[in-house]
Each structure stands twice: as C-alpha cells, then as structure tokens.
Amino acid sequence: MKLSCNDEKVNELNQTIKSAKKVVFFGGAGVSTASGISDFRSEKGLYNIKSKYGTSYENMLSHEYFFNHPKIFYKFYKEQMINKSAKPNLAHIALSEFEQNYPNKLTIITQNIDNLHQSAGSKNVLELHGSVYRNYCLKCGEFYDVDFILNSKDLPRCQKCGELVKPDVVLYQEQLNEGILDAAIKACIEADVMIVGGTSLMVYPAAYLIQYFHGKTLIMINKQVTQYDSYANYVFYDDITKVLPLLLK
C-alpha cells in the first residue's frame, strides 16, 4: 500500500510500531542527506559526480585502490568521506527519541559511516560498513580517531610501528564484519516491525537483510522505487525526515 504523510493510516502505523515487541530500522545514505552528506547513487550522488582523479569515485572506494594508490585515496577520502560539521537531522532524532521512550525495542542497522545515529543519542546501532570515526593500524591494531587522519600531512602512519593506518570502513572487495552482520540478521529475524529507509537496496550483502524479516509489518521509505517495494506492506515515496517523526512520535 502506497501512503503519504497525510494519510490516516500513519497514525495506525504509529500505534503498530509502539505496540511491537521488537522493531528494526534499516537505513542507508538517504537518511543522512538532510544533514549535508551526499548519497551515492542518486542523480546528484557521489558516484554520478565526475571524478577529478582519473577514475570513478566508486572505484576509489575499493580495497584494491586503497592499497595501490593510498596517497590519492586519502586525498579523496578527506575531501569526500569525512564531514565533521554534519549534525543529526529529524530522522536521526526521531529514532533516538523512540529508543529512549521504548527501551530494548529498537535496533538500528545502518549502512552509513557518519556516526550521526550515535551523535543523536542512539545506543543500539549496528554499523554494517564501519565508521570514519574509527581507524586502525594495519599491523599492530592501534586505534586512531578521525582527527589523526585529517591532520596527517602525508599518509597516516602508526605512531607505534610506522605501518599504514586504515579507516575502519568496509571498502568494495572487503567482507562485512561477521559479528555485526550476524547481529543484524538476528535483529531482522526477531522483529515484528521492520522499517527500511533511505536506501536503494542495491548494495550486497546488506540488501539481503530484508529477506530475513518475517514479521507482520514491513514499511519502506524512499524517494525512489526499489526492487524490494513489492515485499512491503506500506511504501512511502517521500522524504524520510518527514515520515519517520510521524511514524515514531
């Protein structure tokens, strides 16, 4: 069923969500665009912007490119992937407030690496693709924060052993963290209500998570059509910052 923010069914869905035993929210880049962070596959997304580095930005976010061209990777990474000025928007805040009002009910699964859910106050967050705010030495595992990366004049190298420091983000050709993926699958299996928002559902294996949901109510929120819309009970083709606060109020 296609719904709008003004539909009377929204209030009924609000009650369904609040009465559920377990709720899972699965979000993508579209959750953070209102915070000034670019998405990837929309018309104005990162992958559709002409690269100034002689190869596509999508290719630059690969494991192979990182290790073969680390200096260029980090120049691009600092310019395009880190945005410390970004603040949580109404979608992040609605999720955080719902978690506070209904403890132990909500699990957030995000493909985003921007830390905005945590900045909004959410605690139960599973970051499928890591975070730009965490970085580790490839040799000894020493942790470094985002400022260490930003302030590195050349390649960021470990202060203990001198090895390259890598962002704790999952690049193309890399596997997801098995523990986080298992926890996400478990959350989807146990949920009565699943809300999917701001994602094209074109990135795998993350997009497969929707197939683990066997609860009663699946809600999709996205500006564009996705290949999984037919799976949903309710679909909103609208701005997630408008829809989520109504569903979770």
Image: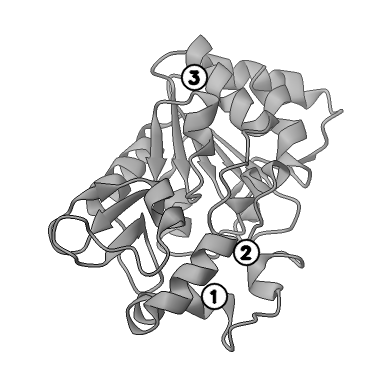
The residue depicted at 31 percent of the width and 50 percent of the height is 181
Check disc 3 and report the residue beneath it: 99
Check disc 1 and report the residue beneath it: 58
Disc 2 residue type?
A: Phe
| Mark 2 or 1, nearer chain start | 2
Q: Position of residue 78 (x, y in %)?
A: 52, 61
* Closer-to-camera residue (163/82): 163
Check disc 2 and report the residue beneath it: 40
The CA span between labels 2 and 3 is: 28 Å
The CA span between labels 2 and 1 is: 9 Å
The residue depicted at 63 percent of the width and 44 percent of the height is 31
Disc 1 residue type?
A: Glu
The residue depicted at 70 percent of the width and 47 percent of the height is 36
Do callouts 2 and 1 mark residues in contact (Cβ within 8 Å)? yes
Q: Secondary structure at mark 3?
A: helix
Do callouts 2 and 3 mark residues in contact (Cβ within 8 Å)? no
Q: Is there any visible trace of residue 1 in the rendered image?
A: no
Given the current orientation, which residue lies at the most extreme top position? 101
| Mark 2 or 3, nearer chain start | 2
Q: Position of residue 56 (x, y in %)?
A: 58, 81
Instruction: Report crowding for label 1: few under 14, some 14 to 19, many 20 or more residues within 10 A (C-alpha).
Output: some
Question: Which quarter shows the N terminus?
Answer: top right
